Image: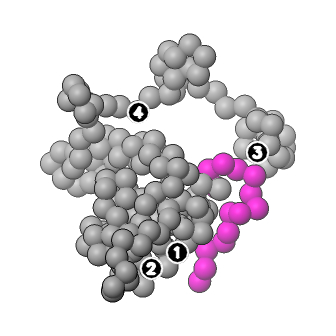
Amino acid sequence: MKAKSFSGMACSVAGAIEAIVDRWGILILRDLMLGLNRYDQLQKSSGIPAQTLATRLKQLEAAGLIRKHRYQENPPRDEYRLTQKGGDLWPVLVALREWGDRWQAHGADGPPLDLVDRETGHPLALNLIDSVTGAPVGPEQATPRPGPGADDAMRFRLGLVD
């Protein structure tokens, strides 16, 4: 049974989920961001079935998140690269990693992956910042409000309409 499409919903989260496709799509994007780019690497990393991988790659390409690049003509071989749109999902994956580490969703004795500054080696953390002042903003300071594209459903989610 095919899942219901979110494509008509005026919600940025729903639109992002629609573009990413599903949990396999997230893992493919993770692997591409870690530098894996060939079909066999992507399959080995996640254990994704071959037909599922082929389908998800086509869907991610159709969504504009990745592009196929021919690296060998005989026999024909392609690799996959993130587009700017796909690369812009980096903070989403970092947020999922941080949540998984905090709540030990990985089931390991410690975080499976550390994210550090290339020059200093210091650990990195994802944070919200005030776009004008550059000051860090905690969750208690962040407040949602309707944007210019908000519809009645979004206003309902925000408690502004019944």
Disc with the residue nearer the chain's start (4 vs 3)? 4
What number is the disc on residue 126? Answer: 4
**Is residue 17 left or right of 34 when viewed as pictured?**
right
Label 1 near label 2: C-beta < 8 Å?
Answer: yes
**Is residue 70 left or right of 153 when viewed as pictured?**
left
**Foreground mark, 3 or 2?**
2
The residue under the point 45% across, 42% down is: 91
**Foreground mark, 3 or 1?**
1
Name the element at disc 2.
Answer: helix
Main secondary structure along the magenta-highlighted residues: loop
Depth check: give the residue in front, 49 or 108.
49
Name the element at disc 1.
Answer: helix
In percent of width and height, residue 132 lies at 60, 16
Disc with the residue nearer the chain's start (4 vs 2)? 2
Depth check: give the residue in front, 39 or 122.
39
In percent of width and height, residue 17 lies at 58, 58
The boundaries of the magenta stretch are: 1-14
Disc with the residue nearer the chain's start (4 vs 1)? 1
Amino acid type of disc 2?
Ala
Residue that carries the numbered disc 2 in the rendered image: 54
**Foreground mark, 4 or 2?**
2
